[in-house]
Amino acid sequence: MKITTRRSFFNYMALLGLVTFSATPLHAKGPKEAFKYQESPKDGKKCSDCIHFIAQSNECKVVRGSISPEGWCTLYNQK
Ligand code: SF4
């Protein structure tokens, strides 16, 4: 794309934004360390009681990796 005018520059930037946005998964998960994930419950709160926990696969909708039903992180949200 050849950028010759101010208008074409802004059109190009809008297109670039769309491409970048569409290439980023909306369900991107974060690393365990970022949310202080631990393998044990905290104050009685644990992954198996969290809305983000996927029991069938021991995964989480928002934290990457294998998740223990007895774990906990700062994104905990009770069912
Ligand atoms: S407590 Fe954290 S790691 Fe556990 S299921 Fe909820 S969001 Fe995922």
Image (tube, helix red, strand yellow):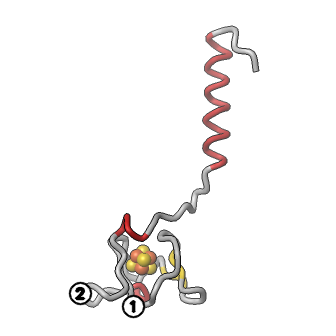
User: Which residue does the image show at 42% across and 71% down from the upper left?
Assistant: 32
Residue 40, horizontal then vertical, whole percent: 33, 88
Q: Residues within 10 Å of mark 1 (few under 14, many from 20)?
A: some
Against 14, is 61 above or below?
Answer: below
Q: Is mark 2 within 8 Å of ligand 1?
A: no
In the rendered structure, which amino acid carries the disc numbered 2? Asp
The residue singled out by tag 1 in the image is 70
Q: Secondary structure at mark 2?
A: loop
Tell me the CA gap for discs 1 and 2. Answer: 12 Å
* Residue 43 - label: 2
User: Which residue does the image show at 47% across and 64% down from the upper left?
Assistant: 30
Left or right of 39, for residue 59: right
In the rendered structure, which amino acid carries the disc numbered 1? Glu
| 37 or 25, nearer to the observer | 37
Residue 58 found in image quarter:
bottom right
* Residue 7 - label: none
Residue 4, horizontal then vertical, whole percent: 70, 9
Against 69, is 61 above or below?
Answer: above
Left or right of 63, for residue 17: right
| 68 or 78, nearer to the observer | 68
Q: Secondary structure at mark 1?
A: loop
